[in-house]
Image (spheres, helix red, strand yellow):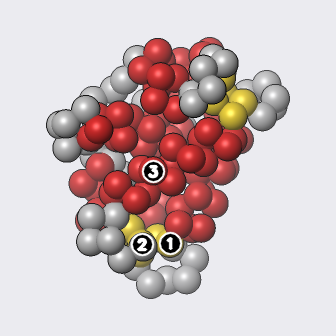
Amino acid sequence: MRQIALVVMLIAVVFTCTAGYGVAAEQMTKEEVMATADKNHDGRIDREEYDQRMTEVFFFADTDKDGKLSWEELQAVVVDAEPQRFKAADTDGDGKLALYEYLYVLHADFTAADKNHDGVLDMEEVAVMLVRK
């Protein structure tokens, strides 16, 4: 379930960094996660909102602006990032994650978090993600 923890941490990163801290986030409340990702304020995070938030995180974390995330860039925002997971996501073996590689892995995380398979993460599913971290 560390995969789900990565999702929560990545959602949290943009919130924290846009708040002016510039470092990896501490665990957020379910309300804070919802506030940062639920763009239409319907109390749920759909795949489009999720993809948008994760894309924002990708470009925030890409500090050298080369369009890819290195292991070091990911570690700077995800304190407990797993090297084997990074390596598995790096399908072209170049040592960096392109946006499509990054989002592919996170799509699987979204699916795992969506326990009732309705295509959205509701407050309860977000709360479960936070507890599993």
Q: Which of marks 3 and 1 is in front?
A: 3
Q: Where residue 133 is drawn, which disc sits there?
A: none
| The N terminus sits in image quarter | top right
Q: What element carries label 3?
A: helix
How far apart are labels 3 and 1 at the CA level?
14 Å
Q: Sort mark 3 into few (<14), some (14-19) or many (20+) by Cα contacts within 10 Å.
A: some
Q: Is residue 84 visible?
A: no
How far apart are labels 2 and 3 at the CA level?
13 Å
Tag 2: amino acid? Lys
* 60 vs 93: above or below: above
Q: Contact, CB < 8 Å: mark 2 with mark 1?
A: yes
Q: Where residue 56 is drawn, which disc sits there?
A: 3
- Label 2 sits on residue: 68
Residue at (58%, 58%) from the top-left corner? 103
x, y percentage for residue 55? 51, 54
- Label 1 sits on residue: 98
Tag 3: amino acid? Glu
x, y percentage for residue 37? 52, 32
Indicate the quadrant where residue 32 lies: top left
Q: What element carries label 2?
A: strand
49 with respect to 117 (left or right): left
Indicate the quadrant where residue 13 lies: top left
